[in-house]
Amino acid sequence: MGRVLACSLTVLSVHGLYSASDDVVELNPSNFNREVMQSDSLWLVEFYAPWCGHCKNLTPEWKKAATALKGIVKVGAVDADQHNSLGGQYGVRGFPTIKIFGANKHKPEDYQGGRSSPAIVDAALNALRSLVKDRLGGKTGGSDYGRQSGGGAGNKKDVVELTDDNFDSTVLDSDDFWMVEFFAPWCGHCKNLEPEWTAAATEVQEQTKGKVKLGAVDATVHQGLASRYGIRGFPTIKVFRKGEEPEDYQGGRTRSDIVARAMDLYSDNIPPPELQEILNEDILKKTCEDYQLCIISVLPHILDTGASGRNSYLEVMRTMAEKYKKKMWGWLWTEAGAQMELESSLGIGGFGYPAMAAINARKMKFALLRGSFSETGIHEFLRELSVGRGSTATVGGGALPKINTVEPWDGNDGVLPTEDDIDLTDVDLEKDEL
């Protein structure tokens, strides 16, 4: 396990820590295969020794977690002091050791989290979410990695073989992001990781269009690389970004864990969504219907701010679009008075510029920025929205309003109309009124 909280394996005779009245399932060599290995459920299993102080401290938290997860995730415990063959089968060397038995029961994951019941429950629900996603994607058990071709097994060609000779040009000089495994061919954990790494490499290649790559270094052959990056154990995974120091990968060893980290790298570095002016109905409709939320700003008239003032507001919007780009929201703006029906439907009309609204077109609900039109004010507004807080109202008329077709802003200051621009030919005035 990740933390050094392990008791020695001294043999002492003490009664077990759990009873039949607990929601923790007592596991042993007689029922382990039936209860865990043949089950479709997700299991969290603690391997403990009754005499171990850390195990005794964990016991009440483990019981609380089991009760909270009852009917959702199975929670078990093995007295590995009494059933040492079962502990040995899963490489248990210290107590307590917790393992998560998910889709592939033959490759349980080590639990690396905290020892409190909330931390345990959170880890269980995260593992359950990954299991459900795998099933939705058509992946079941460990069978994906046993196939010789196609499907979730991945393609070994998607894992780039890295060497002392090609590492710098392939990884360090690349504009792409790299996750690199340093392995040893004789390492059992490396062998367990290989099918997960391969399957993840194929999925990441497809989902990021090659912007995130997975590679592998045989550190027993390419010892120069292993020495350069201080590799002391196997497998070691490092994340490389151009021009930055590599960072250690601390996540799980399943395909879904690896893909999740790769997608974080990808989304951190995708360009922000385009900030568009509302020039016609298609722009509003497409943006608001294609995204979960569309963020709309109504900026003061160009005569009130000039080009520099308007650009300042637009820069604030671009900054926030960058900050919230992972949300994949749409970002739009219009000039005060250009889209009066839109303003009216959002309760903005006629005053209080600049204004901002966030629209959920599926529910036809919107929320208005009540704070300042600044990075701080907008951040508070969007943060409340992203966690489901903040007051909302129904879009006026229950549908997106009619949008006028207008010319795009030319980037210049506004110009007041001159007397020459005023046409009085159609005005019937008496001579003494002229």
Image (cartoon, rainbow, N blue to C red):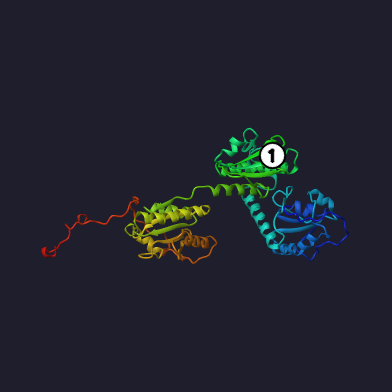
| Number of numbered discs on residues | 1
Q: Amino acid at mark 1?
A: Ser
Which x, y percent locates residue 395? 43, 63
Question: Of all residues shown, which one is farthest toward the right?
Answer: 13
Against 391, residue 246 (above or below) is above
Describe residue 343's horizontal placement relative to residue 89 as left or right: left
**Picture quarter containing residue 129?**
bottom right
- Image quarter where the C terminus lies is bottom left
Which x, y percent locates residue 69? 70, 62
Residue toward you, 395 or 368: 368
**Measuring 58% from the left and 41% from the top, which residue is drawn there?**
205
Asked which secondary structure carries label 1, the reply is helix
Question: Of all residues shown, which one is farthest toward the left?
Answer: 431
**Measuring 80% from the left and 61% from the top, which residue is drawn there?**
53
Residue toward you, 72 or 271: 271
For label 1, the crowd category at 10 Å Cα-Cα, with few meaning under 14, some 14 to 19 and many 20 or more, is: few
**Measuring 45% from the left and 50% from the top, which residue is drawn there?**
274
The residue pinned by badge 1 equals 227
Describe residue 55's horizontal placement relative to residue 304 as left or right: right
Which x, y percent locates residue 255? 65, 46
Which x, y percent locates residue 196? 67, 44
